[in-house]
Image: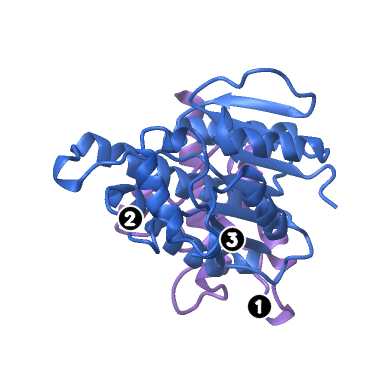
Chain colours: A purple, B blue
Amino acid sequence: MNTPEAQFSTIYRAVDWINGGLPADRQLTKTPETRLLGPQSVVDSLALVNLLIAVEREVEDMFGISLTLANERALSMNESPFRTIQSLADYVGVLISEAQNA
Amino acid sequence: MLENKVVLISGTSRGIGRALVEHYAGKECQVIGCSRSPFEGELRNYRHYRLDVADESAVKEMFAQIRKNEGRLDVLINNAGVASMNHSLLTPMTTVSKIIQTNFMGTFLLCREAARLMQARRYGRIVNFATVAVPLKLEGEAIYAASKAAVISLTQILAREFAEFGITVNAVGPTPIKTDLIRGVPPEKLEVLIARQAIKRYGEPRDVIQVIDFFIDPASDFVTGQIIFLGGV
């Protein structure tokens, strides 16, 4: 089911995979407030790319839906959906809902 | 060494692509291929998709099925390509679009989707196709050579972007090989072209396969961003 719990669970599995390749002092914490973009983010641009692709993979496994997170829509938003884990979860939820209702 | 590797090859209905399928299927790889035309005959460890490599939704669906059936991708060989020998002043925009879409956009799209799949296991080998028409600045092939020059630049930059994922990206640049791609080229023009090679003969599929075997060897994990032109060009 496309619930906030399922969305966070999906993202946190992707975070676990990313953390497996990051040094100990650059691990992503699994909280909604964790920043993914900007000066307070602990991830660089490559790690963010890795995270988004890992999230797409987890969404496909969990929901059977193929998403492209970094699409024109995301890139044209005034506020990036990739700012925090919370905003990412919200965005993933919207995309899953749209795909399920298509 | 390549046994059981999952290999995706584009442009497999004939020519070099067909030869690549037979070679890697013979090496006990699990081979997946695609082309706009059907694949004639059956091979035990080969699966075919009919699609246009520039069709994003069809390509994404193919990769979704690879992920579901094989669970991974080890090798991508971007062989699909079209050409049209014509003076630029007589080249219509429809021809330009078709060549750029198939040769460059199709190559990019398959690289992107393959890397997404390969990234999960932090391993992959991508081989793109260039052409000696680029360094030889071949008159009559302005658009074809330009599309392949773009593939060369793409190869070199993707090699750097994908390196951290454990994916190497290289390209092979064949000389003229007797396939449908050069069917419309007058023989005398081909002879002039071959005369500019250090080794003056037509290429054969085995020459291309030799280079690809080297690039995709698991031991070639320190070789990336390289373009090997055949015939000493």
Q: Which mark is residue A75?
A: none
* Subunit of label 2: B
Q: What residue is disc 3 on? A: B169
**Amino acid type for the residue under numbered disc 3:** Val
The percent position of residue A46, horizontal first and vertical second, equals 54, 68
Residue flagged by tag 2: what amino acid is it? Leu
Q: Where residue A75 appears, x then y in whole percent?
A: 35, 55
Q: How many marks?
A: 3
Checking the image for residue B138, the label placed there is 2
- Along the line of sight, which residue is nearer the eye, B60 or B228? B228
Q: Quick check: B29 left or right of B59? A: right
Can residue A48 be seen from the camera position used here?
no
Which residue is depicted at the point 50% across and 70% down?
A45
The residue drawn where x is 53% and y is 36% is B60
Return the disc, 2 or 3, that comes first in the chain's sequence. 2
Task: Kindly indicate the quadrant of the structure image that contains residue B20.
Answer: top right
Q: Nearer the viewer, mark 1 or mark 2?
A: 2
Q: Taking the image as drawn, is residue B143 in sight?
A: yes
Tag nearer the camera, 2 or 3 = 2
Q: Find disc 1 in the rendering and name its residue.
A: A26
Say which chain tag 3 marks.
B
Q: Nearer the viewer, mark 3 or mark 1?
A: 3
Q: CA distance from mark 3 to mark 1?
A: 28 Å
- Dot 2: few (<14), some (14–19), or many (≥20) neighbours within 10 Å? some
- Give the secondary structure at mark 3: strand
**Which chain is home to disc 1?**
A
Q: Secondary structure at mark 2?
A: loop
Query: Marks 1/2: CA distance?
Result: 51 Å
As measured in the structure, the alpha-carbon distance from the residue carrying label 2 to the one carrying label 3 is: 25 Å
- Residue in the picture at 35% in, 53% down: B145
